[in-house]
Image (cartoon, grey):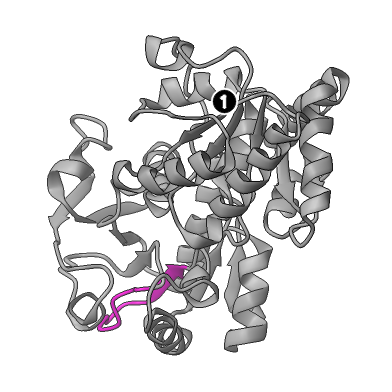
Amino acid sequence: MTATPCAAFDCRMIRHSGIGVVVRHLLGEWLRAFPDFRLELLGPEEDIRREIPRGDRSTRIVPWSAPVYGPAGLLGRPPVRDANVFFSPHYAAPLRLDIPLVAMVHDLIHITNPPRPGTSLYMKGVLALLRRKARYIVTPSRHTKVQLQTLHGFEPQRVLTYANGPGLGGTKPMRTQAVESFPEKFLLAVGLWKPHKNWDFLIGRLGKLTRAGKISVPLVVAGMEQDSQRFARELARQSGLEVFFAPQLTDGEIVRLYEKATALVFPSLAEGFGFPVIEAMSRGTPVLIPDLPPMTDIAGGAALRFDPDSAESFDKAVPALLNDRELRQKMGDAGRRRATEFSWARYAAGVEETLRRALAE
């Protein structure tokens, strides 16, 4: 193995949610813990520079603007300089590489819940190429690993799982008018407007419970794009549920929102990891999740579960959580303990070890 390892790190999605969260946390931990393993950061220079310490001279930024998802990104040659291993934080890794490739596959939602026609077929084709090209695949959950092995033929010894940490870990809560203006008691839901996030089910069932007099709290929605909120507003109007939308918040404000919420409801049917679950638990907020992996893998016994195929199960769980202060306290305390088992330091150490392994081969 080379005496001076250097990894090319694809940072084109550094400002995104989801994968962008992984990129930012991994980069921060890497620069702190592995100074002897140099980096070439490929992507938008200005965005990357905001994430590295001022005066850092060991890290090279190489501008790269090729689209992540599309032929130009897959088949074009990335501008690698001195790196001898390449890390891609998404399945759409560049395939024309002369150095070993390690790629992260966060989830297979583009196959299981495709947002548009043709997406599933495209991703299956890319995964087939990745299976032949990549030395190792990194996943944040065993659920994704099992899908890659059983449905797409990846060799189990080449798929390594390292859990992510909380997306907002270490951030101090911030009391602001934007957050404090919400009611004293509310349910919180966090996520983008996508079919697998199950918004129709959530808003519809909460509305029915409200009309039946079984609950009397509003829903606060955070993280939803401005132009998608109209769909949620219309669902809420039809169901009779009072819904508030959190404006664009800082990390500190989002943490305060978790702490202020009575509980987090996370009804998503498909995830690669599920950041809101671990984020809420880390702040002592009780969580309600569907009885599905990877949410159950993250929460363990520290969250209340409902059967995603049973509206009756959900309808029983929500009032139970809202009306039982002792249960909420128990879930909150268990969540705090469970959240300590997840850390970005351990995730970064796993990725670093995998890159060294790829180099050694």
Q: Which residues are magenta?
A: 92-104
Residue 283, image x, y percentages: 63, 24
What is the three-letter code of the residue carrying label 1? Answer: Tyr
Q: In the rendered image, is residue 3 in sight?
A: yes
210 in relation to 120, above or below: above
Q: Quadrant of residue 299?
A: top right
Residue 199, image x, y percentages: 54, 51
Query: Could you say which is closer to the camera, residue 356 or residue 157?
Result: 157
The answer to if 31 sits in the magenta stretch is: no
Residue at the image position 72 percent from the left and 37 percent from the top: 209
Residue 155, image x, y percentages: 62, 84
Majority SS type along the magenta span: loop
So how many labels did they put on this image? 1
Q: In the rendered image, is residue 340 in sight?
A: no
Residue at the image position 19 percent from the left and 72 percent from the top: 78
Residue at the image position 37 percent from the left and 65 percent from the top: 87
Residue 85, image x, y percentages: 35, 69
Q: Would residue 248 be found to the left or right of residue 332 on screen?
A: left
Report the residue marked by disc 1: 258
Q: Which part of the image, by quadrant, shows the N terminus?
A: bottom left
106 in relation to 169, above or below: below
147 in relation to 64, above or below: below
Query: Could you say which is closer to the camera, residue 191 or residue 74?
Result: 191
215 in relation to 123, above or below: above
Query: Could you say which is closer to the camera, residue 281 or residue 96?
Result: 281
Residue at the image position 67 percent from the left and 66 percent from the top: 143
The answer to if 98 sits in the magenta stretch is: yes
Query: Could you say which is closer to the camera, residue 245 or residue 325?
Result: 245
Q: Would residue 42 be found to the left or right of residue 360 on screen?
A: left
> Which element is circle 1 on?
helix
